[in-house]
Amino acid sequence: MATNQDQTTSQKPGHPPAQATLHEVRTAENSAAFLLPKLQDMKNVNPDLKLLDVGCGSGTIAASFAKLIPEGRVTGIDVNSSILPRARAVAEMNGVANIEFQEGSIFQLPFADETFDVTFCHQVLIHIGTPWDALREMLRVTKRGGIVAAREGDYESECIWPELPGLKKFHALMAGCMKAGGGNPTTGRLLLSWALKIGVERSHVQSSFGTSSYDTPSGRNTCSKGLRDQLRGGSLREKAFKYGLGSENDLDEMIEAWEEWEKRDDASLSMLQGEILIQK
């Protein structure tokens, strides 16, 4: 997602395979661990849960949710309809049938009030200009007694080693693209604030922080290839030129820096991920 009131997914058909791989390593286990104990408790009481994954992209998290609630039903929604065939293919590859995908915006979810037991989003609010409105809409479609869950990066908490000049430029490019598109790089730390802003009682919100890390050879390879491909020909390159945030030489320097970073045995990258559970 990238713009204020009109989200666009960060991955679309035609993106290089490595970029797809970067997004498709995400599962419920590694991207929604804070939600899973609550989901298990809810499933024990009501096996036929209904779960909505907002901004589902290529569907890897949604498909893993479907495995976790086999008697329930998962719906994935994304504003970009062109990613949905990939999401359906991912679900088929995972052998799950209790899942469906459709087009729709987080600001106008095409569902009646109190439809879902759990409404979830991951790395969506960081890219939009009025995330509290999105949370309000997620609450609307959630049943009383249900859960709204969000996990969002806090880009300014990123720790990377080695601190190569090209990687510092890349950090500035990413933060600049988020801001130019209407998003907020510090979203992770603001989730609780936004929940309170829309009138949620503090006692109904659990706030926590997790981390995302790339410090193994395979993790570094996935991260580096995905980002290099975006700099060579993906949406990140387009945004860099569109917003005047980097020249051809700057992007070449960033690509070389990611290549060097991947090869370093001492290389690592971590970032805080803000997490909230809102009990409706």
Image (cartoon, helix red, strand yellow):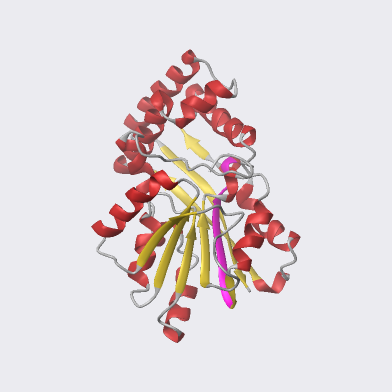
Name the one closer to the observer, 166 or 111. 111
Q: Eyeballing the image, is 277 above or below 88? A: below
- Res. 154 in view: no
146 to the left or right of 223: right
Residue at horizontal 42 percent and vertical 49 percent from the top: 57
Residue at horizontal 39 percent and vertical 52 percent from the top: 26
| First to last magenta residue range | 145-155
Q: Eyeballing the image, is 40 above or below 128? A: below
Image quarter in which the C terminus is found: bottom right
Q: Eyeballing the image, is 170 above or below 201? A: above
Residue 255, image quadrant: top left
What secondary structure characterizes most of the magenta part? strand
Q: How many badges with numbers are in the image?
A: 0
Residue 47, image quadrant: bottom left
- Res. 58 in view: yes
Asked whether 152 falls inside the magenta stretch, the response is yes
122 to the left or right of 175: left
Residue 79's spot in the image, x, y percent? 50, 48
Residue at horizontal 46 percent and vertical 20 percent from the top: 251
54 to the left or right of 138: left
Name the one closer to the observer, 255 or 58. 58
